[in-house]
Image: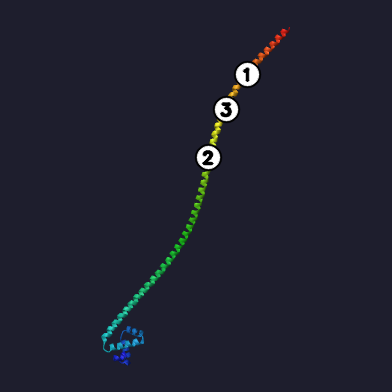
Amino acid sequence: RKMLSKGVDVSTAGHSGQAALSVGSRVWQAIAWSMPERDRMNLYVALAEMNAGKKSKVESLNETMEYEIGRLSREVQRKKVALKEADMYRKKLEKTIEEMETDLAEANSSISHLQSQNADQTKRAELAEKQVADLQKTAGETMQSLSKERTDRARMEKQLVVEYQLREEISDQAQKVQDVLSRTAGEAKHVTRELKICRHEYETYRQSASDVQAAGGQ
């Protein structure tokens, strides 16, 4: 209906359009054959109308289409570049992810190692605390033992002082006894000597008495 209302001969529209395409750019041909059949026929009609006497419009349309094609080509090129950059960025991200995974694995290994070291240090700290507690207990027992030894030593020293004083007293008493014995021995000698004298005198007296008695009897 559109073609008939414009007074275009449908029987020749396709041929005229194809003729316009044959003398037009290859871009038009590519565009025409990429369209659905109905749109392609409409394009043929439009080209037939332009070929009938609207040369400037055809050229303008050609320029517009070529500009659009160029713009689309540039857009496609930009998208290709962007896609390439995106692919490079993706690869870079993948590499970064691999490096991060490697770093994460190393970090996990380091954490495990540190946890192991921390466990060892905790065990050592607990052992050290136990040793300190044992040493404190031993030190307390030693202090108690030393205190007891000091007490015993003080008691022994006091006892030694008492024994020394007693020994001194005994020595003094022994000296006194010795003095008494010495004095007694001297007195005994004197008494013995006196006794001998008395005995001698007694013997002399007895002898004299015997002599006197004998003489008296005569």
Residue 151, label in figure: 2
Q: Residues within 10 Å of mark 3 (few under 14, many from 20)?
A: few
Q: Secondary structure at mark 1?
A: helix
Residue at the extreme top: 218
Q: Position of residue 147 (x, y in %)?
A: 52, 42
Dot 1 amino acid type: Val
**Vertical side of 138 occupied by 4: above or below:** below
The residue shown at (53%, 35%) is 158
Instruction: Give the position of the N terminus as an image quadrant.
Output: bottom left
Separation of marks 3 and 2 at Cα, in angstroms: 32 Å
Dot 3 amino acid type: Gln
**Vertical side of 195 occupied by 75: above or below:** below
The residue indicated by pointer 1 is: 191
Q: Residues within 10 Å of mark 1 (few under 14, many from 20)?
A: some
Instruction: Give the position of the C terminus as an image quadrant.
Output: top right
Q: Position of residue 83 (x, y in %)?
A: 37, 74
**Vertical side of 45 occupied by 182: above or below:** above
Q: Position of residue 170 (x, y in %)?
A: 57, 29
Residue 173, label in figure: 3
Q: Secondary structure at mark 3?
A: helix
The residue shown at (26%, 86%) is 55
Question: What is the number of callouts on the image?
Answer: 3
Q: Are marks 3 and 1 in contact (CB under 8 Å)?
A: no
Mark 3 and mark 1 lie on one chain; the one further toward the N terminus is 3
Separation of marks 1 and 2 at Cα, in angstroms: 58 Å
Please name whichever residue, 117 or 53, is drawn nearer the observer in this view of the structure: 117
Dot 2 amino acid type: Thr
Separation of marks 3 and 1 at Cα, in angstroms: 26 Å
